[in-house]
Amino acid sequence: MDLLIQFLTNTGYYLVDFRNIIMLLIGSLFLYLAIAKEYEPLLLLPIGFGVLVGNIPFFKGFGLGIYEPNSVLHYLYFGVTTGVYPSIVFLGLGAMTDFSSLLAMPRLMLLGAAAQMGIYFTLLSALALGFLPREAGSIAIIGGADGPTSIFLTAKLAPHLIGPIAIAAYSYMALIPIIQPPIMRLLTTKEERRIHMPEMRDVSRVEKLLFPAAGLLLCCFLAPASIPLLGPFFFGNLMKESGVVDRLAQTARTAIIDTATIFLGFTVGASTQADVFLTPKAVGIFFLGAVAFSIATASGVLFGKIMNLFMKQKINPLLGAAGVSAVPGSAREVHSVGLKSDPTNYLLMHAMACNSSGVIGSAICAGILWSFLV
């Protein structure tokens, strides 16, 4: 009987409390959104299942939890805390990215830069709410709408906030179809949404080959701390455009990035143990994350309107919403909103130019924040 009682007191059914139940419901919601609604399933499915795994109650000291040294989950989590997984993801992103649209119309790069204003507004807001400078910097990067970048910077500045910040960043990326369209419609007129963009010129192979090296040097000389992200990113793009290492490029944009995404999402989800995750700071992070993402979207759209005051050839201000680096979700939403105003208005390629510049911009901002706050 004593053995039976001891066994029962070691089960999750006995150890569970209301916080575990809350997190299990959140994990189930993520799985529902990924499977039933198909909201960013490549992100939400591994994160949602990781939340379930991380919130199964267990007795401490047995080497089971993600925060317990020498546990299997702890070793898998090493790729998050050191920034290895985000760097690998950026390698794959580079191997998938086509910069033709950005090179064909470089002025769209300004919209990608403008959208990063959400990061700096949120930094000031987080400081005003009492977060420490390093914590505020980690929260602010959510405005870039780039999950790997958010995780990378948080691992360097505020590792204890990786769970809440990663969940917030990926949640808002998945909710792009809900968050961005109302902001775009609110800040633009129907006539502005109907503006047609000119056809893009053909970009030569030489331009595509020179861009990764030029981009690396320009960006990393400006913010050397962005090297761990932009180095693999531009290297992956060079492999793609060179055409001489197709096997490596194919591996980078399929097997390698898929493997990193699986472990990144799963371990980030598992890091949301209720006793670590459910804190007042987590609530503040989710609020500020929503503010950051909304301001970033609005900043891009408003800057597009400002550019039109000085340009003879007008640009569609909707493109500014794609300046956040949520690839390709925000570009698709811009295209969708444009089509609803005019079924003949195709903005996808132009939006992808802003989107790809947003990826670079958020990585540069992360490097700047890291260098200032470390």
Image: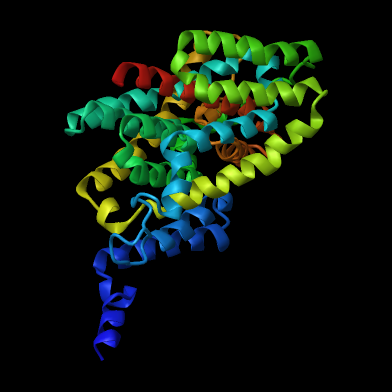
Which color scheme is applied? rainbow
Out of 149 and 180, give the one closest to the viewer.
149
Position of 128 relative to 256 (above/below):
above
Q: What quarter of the picture does the C terminus occupy?
A: top left
Residue drawn at 74 percent across, 31 percent down: 249
- Image-based side of 223 in relation to 124, left or right: right
Whether 8 is drawn above or below 322: the answer is below
In-image side of 156 versus 41 (left or right) = left
Residue at x 36% of width, y 29% of height: 156
How many numbered dots are placed on residues in this image?
Answer: 0
Q: Is residue 197 above or below residue 15?
A: above
Measured as percent of width and height from the top left, residue 292 is found at 36, 33
Extreme residue toward the bottom, this view: 1
Using the rendered view, name the quadrant where residue 18 is placed. bottom left
Using the image as rendered, state which of residue 98 and residue 351 is in the foreground: 98
How far from the left and from the top, in percent, is residue 129? Answer: 18, 34
Q: Is residue 311 visible?
A: no
Q: Residue at x 28, y 71 (%)?
A: 16
Of 17 and 174, the residue lying toward us: 17
Quadrant of the rendered structure where residue 318 is?
top right
- In the rendered view, does 203 fall on the left or right side of 36? right
Q: Which residue appears farthest toward the right when viewing the image?
A: 244
Taking the image as drawn, is residue 23 in sight? yes
- Looking at the rendered image, the quarter that the N terminus falls into is bottom left
When asked about the image quadrant of residue 322, the answer is: top right
Estimate the x, y position of residue 46 in percent, counting from the top left. 52, 54
Where residue 84 appears, as percent x and y from the top left, is 51, 34
